[in-house]
Image (tube, grey):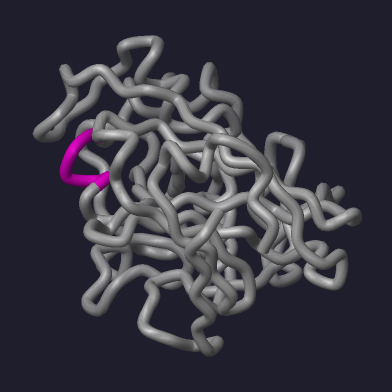
Amino acid sequence: MNRRTFLAVGGTATLGGIAGCLSGDDGSPANEFDYETQSYEGTAVPLAPIDDVIEWYENDEAEFVDARGRDQYDEVRIAGAVFSPAPDGVDDDPTEEWSTDTRIVTYCGCPHHLSVMRGATLIDAGYEHTYAIDEGLQEWYDRQYPMEGSSVDVERQSYRISGTTDPEYRGQMALLEQLDADRAEAAPIDDDGSYTLQLHYAGSPDSEFRVGVDGNWIEGTLAELTSGPVTI
């Protein structure tokens, strides 16, 4: 990798300063079904199996929240889902119109890291019946469950970006962002500093992305970033 950029924490990137722990916990205010959970900033979010989620969807028993970037949402999303990206949504967020006893399902494609982040902040805001789809959006797509968007019928490729960073960042998030679009994915950093990011993408492998943690970024094409370990 021959291009390296360092940005200060709290810069202009949508997710650039995000840190959090995504480790299993035993309970959550929302976890009435005793699902496995993962945590962000100390708040546990239940991971709902997709088989249960599709029943909620078909019975109109939940509202759905897309926790990804705007371009991803516009291209392909669960039919009827609102745009409310991780970690805190947007100004005049659509979730603010819902009562706090609403069952909410968040989702992303990585498969559930951004959705856990958004789920945690919703729970903290009082929406205690909030869940993240365990298997993520790709499984929903593969099962041909209801989708909408400008690129639903466009074939997407699956990419994996693996690498390492200083173990001091364990429990924080490695982030993947497209430079010329609002597209993002995230993955937790393991105790040894390793991470693996997943991206389902219909664009060119020559598209420019960056991978970062704590304001430090590596830039490159998708082809470059997937060609070998990316050390941040």
Residue in view at x 52 percent, y 23 percent: 50
Residue in view at x 9 percent, y 34 percent: 150
Residue 22 as seen in the image, left or right of residue 89:
right
Residue 177 as seen in the image, left or right of residue 216:
left
Residue sitting nearer the eye, 145 or 173: 173
Task: Name above or below for residue 32 compared with residue 159.
Answer: below
Residue in view at x 44 percent, y 62 percent: 86
On the image, which quarter does residue 170 sit in? bottom right
Residue in view at x 36 percent, y 63 percent: 99
Give yes or no for residue 58 being in the magenta stretch.
no
Task: Name above or below for residue 156 compared with residue 78.
Answer: above
Quarter holding the C terminus is bottom right
Task: Name above or below for residue 108 compared with residue 137.
Answer: below
Q: Position of residue 203 (x, y in %)?
A: 24, 34
Q: Position of residue 94 (x, y in %)?
A: 24, 64
The residues colored magenta run 72-76
Magenta segment, prevailing SS (helix, strand or loop):
helix
Quarter holding the N terminus is bottom right
